[in-house]
Image: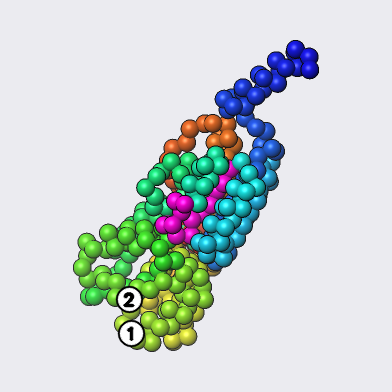
Amino acid sequence: MSKSRKTLLSTVAAGLIAGAIALPASALTLGFAQVGAESEWRTANTVSIKEAAKAAGITLKFSDAQQKQENQIKAIRSFIAQKVDVIAFAPVVTTGWDTVLMEAKKAKIPVILTDRSIETKDESLYVTMIGSDFTEEGRKAGKWLLENYKGQGDVNIVELQGTVGSAPAIERKKGFEEVIKAEPRFKITRSQTGDFTRAKGKEVMEAFLKTDKNIQVLFAHNDDMAIGAIQAIEAAGMKPGKDIMIISIDAVKGAFEAMMAGKLNVTVECNPQLGPQLMDIVKEVKAGKQQPKRINTKESIFPMETAAKEFPNRKY
Ligand code: GZL
């Protein structure tokens, strides 16, 4: 091999090792382990990730875990075996990740958390987490209720929680309760998981209504469960959005349609379009650029009165 060729090769190798020469995006492979396809929000999140990977020229290996942690762990192990450049995933629950993330660390594959966070003793197991501040979403829901509830006397609230053990379920509940405790007449009288799905949300709301019709408010951790509950409330001969005030989170199209029909009172936005931001971070991580441990997405709140005007702008 000629001297000049040797010099060129050693320069490129040194550059790659130093991270100074970023791999072209087309050479990058991202393994993404998605929660599932349980809600409109999740579907929109998946579309955003797939479209953004394509636009960024990043090869995407995608897996759908059907909301099961063991399937996400299997997918991460498969990405490690395939030696992908970066692994990203939305942890279905907050605990039980240290072992598989240690395997990724040993394989020198950086891990990015999206959407949901994890509890871990070793924060070096992931580079950064991109997602919403779920506690703030719960606070926004609570604040809107205290500012907009017009009735007198006790306010009995039933709560449809998200997936048990998931960051959004834990943190939305925490934020909501933190705010309503300022007004003791607002009480959560029933609370059960609807696992973020329409079917389960309807089933649990039916059970609530069977034992107790003295309900003034429903707080649902996502729009899909709220939409399921609306069906149960109507089947019980009551008017959703009027007899029972409904407060929800996500701001998906289905929520805007329910608000325009007068059946949902407000939805707190939780932005699923994390794809472009994720792909930028994948490239930066591979180029060795430092990342903050937490990157929050910006979000709003949409009451019923704003639904018709905002609906044409909605992308998911
Ligand atoms: C929130 C996301 C939640 C949505 C649900 O970022 O994890 O999971 O609120 C989805 O709709 O199922």
Specify the quadrant that holds the C terminus.
Answer: bottom right
Task: Decide which of tag 2 and tag 1 comes sooner along the chain.
Answer: 2
The answer to the question of whether label 2 and label 1 lie on touching residues, with beta carbons closer than 8 A, is yes
Closer to the camera in the image, 199 or 243: 199
Q: Could you tell me residue 96's position as x and y percent?
A: 44, 57
**Left or right of residue 186: residue 268:** right
Q: Which residue is drawn at 36% across and 71% down?
A: 159
What residue is rendered at 43% in x and 78% in y?
A: 204
Identify the element where label 1 is drawn: loop
Q: Name the residue under label 2.
A: 190
Q: In this view, does 79 lie to the left or right of 191?
A: right
Can I make out residue 82 in this image?
A: yes
Amino acid type for the residue under numbered disc 1: Asp
Dot 2 falls on a residue whose secondary structure is: strand
**Magenta-colored stretch includes residue 85:** no
**Residue 145 against residue 120 in the figure, above or below:** below
Q: Distance between the residues labelled 2 and 1?
A: 9 Å
At horizontal 44% and vertical 86% (from top left) the residue drawn is 236
Report the amino acid beneath label 2.
Answer: Arg
Res. 161 mark: none
Q: What's drawn in magenta, residue-wise?
A: 86-99
Residue 88 position within the rendered picture, expressed as x and y whole percent measured from the top left: 55, 48
Q: Can residue 259 be seen in this view?
A: no
Q: Name the residue under label 1.
A: 212
> Looking at the image, is 1 positioned above or below residue 191?
above
Can residue 95 be found in the magenta stretch? yes
Q: Residue at x 36, y 58 (%)?
A: 171
Find out if the beta carbon at label 2 lies less than 8 Å from the nearest ligand 1 atom: no
Find residue 279 and report its image quarter.
Answer: top right
In the rendered image, residue 307, in percent from the top left (x then y), is placed at 49, 62
